[in-house]
Image: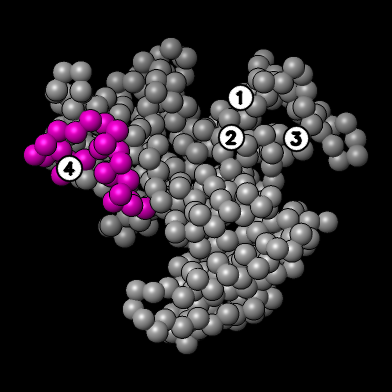
Amino acid sequence: MNHIAIFIDAENLTNWVKNNGVQSLMDELLPLGQIVVRKAYGKWSTPQLIPLQSALNENGFELVHTFHPVSGKNSTDIKMTVDTMEVALDSQVQWIVLATGDSDFSPLFRKLREQGKEVIGVGPKSPLSECVKNSCSRYIYTDDATAADDDSGDDVADAKERANLIVSEKIDSMEMLRSVLQKEDGPIALAAIKPKMLGLDNAFNEKRLGFKTFKDFVKSADFVQMTDVGGGSYMVALAEQKVAVEEDAQMVLAKALKRKGWDMFPRNMLKKIYAEACDLTSFVPMNKQDLVQEIVAKNIAGTTSSIINRALSTFFKAKLVTISGGDDKLWTVTETNQYWKEIDKAMLDRLRVSLKETGQKVPKKDIVSILYGKYADGEAEKLV
């Protein structure tokens, strides 16, 4: 049985611990083996950490108290690093889990991998987390599927953003599943598929997409055939002629847009990326790669360099970008208060073509529901 060691920086992940994140992590790790080391770090006398102690104690964590005698010096990071390297010397510990939310630990992750350890990183989804993610065997996000707060505090808007991002992630994950199966000569054991998917994206997690088990995730795909071979084992293969299950309108629309190379984003995330892009190119145009890196440095919650790159492509498709500089292709993102309308128009143009090609019919009210802009009565319907 594999032995697992868990180290948690409670100061960096206060909200995650408070929202039952530790228990969810324990459930996620259960199939991997036995947890033999459980340590959580922080200055436990601070008001924000005191309420977290009972939940950590209930899960068997040793609370390691750290002091911060000098401002700007994080003794928690130092203590965690020392303890982790000490545990790494134990050959019986195969898996080391570091819940930090801090990209400063990237060298530690790489060193552990060099020593033959399997490393799981735990932290929020952000451009900085991508640096850590690439140094891990697996990565588990602490935030939910949105990781983008709506400035309005509107619960309905929050729910819509969560739904949009989950749909987008689900489509990407399904394409990854299809890619894995296409590389096989025939049926493959269900148990062998997830490791292959984690090899493509080590942050893949079917639970983030709303599935209780990986089997449920695979079974929901309309392009697979799953066969029960007994003993709780299943074989999976592509079945392109399988009759598609009925999908909700939002999934139909997201897939239709994906066929035309259009990505859906949480509204507030796209709003922040647009604002940064306008600001950064307002005086001096930039090439796209440099612009992506500049926005990455802003650390917008829930984004990655890939998401930012695709968001900029969305602005280009919406004719909100001017290209200059000849072969250098320097970008200037146009600042206008009509940007939501321009994005919606570009999206609808592609959606109409895609739905016409497949002969699919979607009620107008469902199409209106995915628009980014907030329009006066009747205006959205006219746009659609």
Q: Secondary structure at mark 3?
A: helix
- The quadrant in which the N terminus is found is bottom right
Q: In terms of depth relative to the viewer, which is nearer, 137 or 21?
A: 137
- Residue 300 is covered by the magenta coloring: yes
Q: Check residue 33 in the rendering and tell me which mark sits there, or answer none.
A: none
Extreme-top residue of the structure: 357
Position of residue 143 measured from the top left corner of the image (x, y, whole percent): 48, 56
Position of residue 222 measured from the top left corner of the image (x, y, whole percent): 63, 26
Tell me the kind of residue under disc 1.
Ser
Q: Which residue is mark 3?
A: 192
Q: Residues within 10 Å of mark 4 (few under 14, many from 20)?
A: some
Q: In terms of depth relative to the viewer, which is nearer, 3 or 220?
A: 3
Q: Which residue is mark 1?
A: 179
Q: Which residue is mark 4?
A: 280
Quarter-wise, where is residue 63 in the image? Answer: bottom right
Say if mark 2 contacts mark 1, CB within 8 Å: yes
First-in-chain label (4 vs 3): 3
Q: Which residue is mark 2?
A: 200
Tell me the kind of residue under disc 4.
Leu
Q: What residue is drawn where x is 43% and y is 26%?
A: 258
Extreme-bottom residue of the structure: 45
First-in-chain label (4 vs 2): 2
Position of residue 198 measured from the top left corner of the image (x, y, whole percent): 63, 39
Q: Secondary structure at mark 1?
A: helix
Q: Is residue 70 left or right of residue 185?
A: left
Q: What residue is drawn where x is 14% and y is 33%?
A: 285
Tell me the kind of residue under disc 2.
Leu
User: Mark 2 and mark 3: span between their CA atoms?
Assistant: 13 Å
Q: What residue is drawn where x is 55% and y is 62%?
A: 99
Position of residue 136 measured from the top left corner of the image (x, y, whole percent): 58, 48
Tell me the kind of residue under disc 3.
Ala
